[in-house]
Amino acid sequence: MLETVVGTNGILVPPPGYLQGVRELCDEHGIVYIADEVMAGFGRCGEWFAVDHFGVTPDLICFAKGVNSGYIPLGGVIISERIAASFQDRAFPGGLTYSGHPLACASAVASIRIFEEEGILENVRTLSASVIEPRLTEIAAKHPSVGDVRGLGFFWALELVKDRQTREPLVPYNASGAAAAPMTAFAAACRAEGMWPFVHFNRTHVVPPCTMTAEELATGLDILDKALDVADEHTT
Ligand SMILES: Cc1ncc(COP(=O)(O)O)c(C=O)c1O
């Protein structure tokens, strides 16, 4: 079971061939491949599912958040035909109080229709390539505190460092209080300009709504750029 692109723990994009290798190993050893697409799915990586980007087919896909943007709580599991067939002559041993709730499912159907009508996947692909990636690359070149930039679609992380050569993180692992001050100051600088950043250890993530326009992205990236001056003050 793995997140196709690891989310909260750092936006870790698998290298080419990695997931194909996982698929082959699962096939070879009779292992069920479960893709957790709760964060990476539904357009976040520019495809319906992030696995589509890598050309692999899992046996099960877990989804939630992006399926309906959380308008109604909904999560689910997509089951491959082969596994679904095993429940044709025996009961599926699962269920929740609100399993298959019609209102929640209707909100997903409506949301998926809007994805199609408003070209959300295209928006993510186009603006990732034309706005986010080039601007983050420029930001990384400009700020000594940026040690790494990585991501896919509208799913990006910046790793902040004290020193680009040694790659020492800007704050220690799991830092809090005074030890986390450089990241706290960076986050405060973002908030002072009206943007609430996601900050985890020495990382900040750029994970905007998939409906964002180029102008809105530029506004957010301008704030990020400016706030990184504060992080730069803590580099050696
Ligand atoms: C990648 C990932 N998987 C699973 C979950 C849990 O999802 P749920 O609360 O819908 O079970 C989360 C929730 O944050 C998540 O980010």
Image (spheres, rainbow, N blue to C red):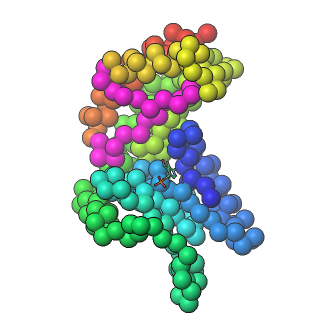
Please report the residue visible at 38 percent of the width from the left and 66 percent of the height from the top: 98
Magenta-drawn segment: 193-212
Please report the residue visible at 58 percent of the width from the left and 78 percent of the height from the top: 83
Q: Main secondary structure of the magenta part?
A: loop
- 153 relative to 171 in the view: left or right: left
Farthest residue, direction right: 29
Residue 167 in sight from this viewpoint: yes
Residue 120 in sight from this viewpoint: no
**Where is residue 138 shown, x and y percent of the image?**
45, 26
**Where is residue 78 shown, x and y percent of the image?**
48, 69
Q: Quadrant of the N terminus?
A: bottom right
| Closer-to-camera residue (222/61) | 61
- 128 relative to 150 in the view: left or right: left
Please report the residue visible at 50 percent of the width from the left and 25 percent of the height from the top: 140
Farthest residue, direction front: 97
| Closer-to-camera residue (129/51) | 51
- 82 relative to 123 in the view: left or right: right
Please report the residue visible at 57 percent of the width from the left and 40 percent of the height from the top: 9
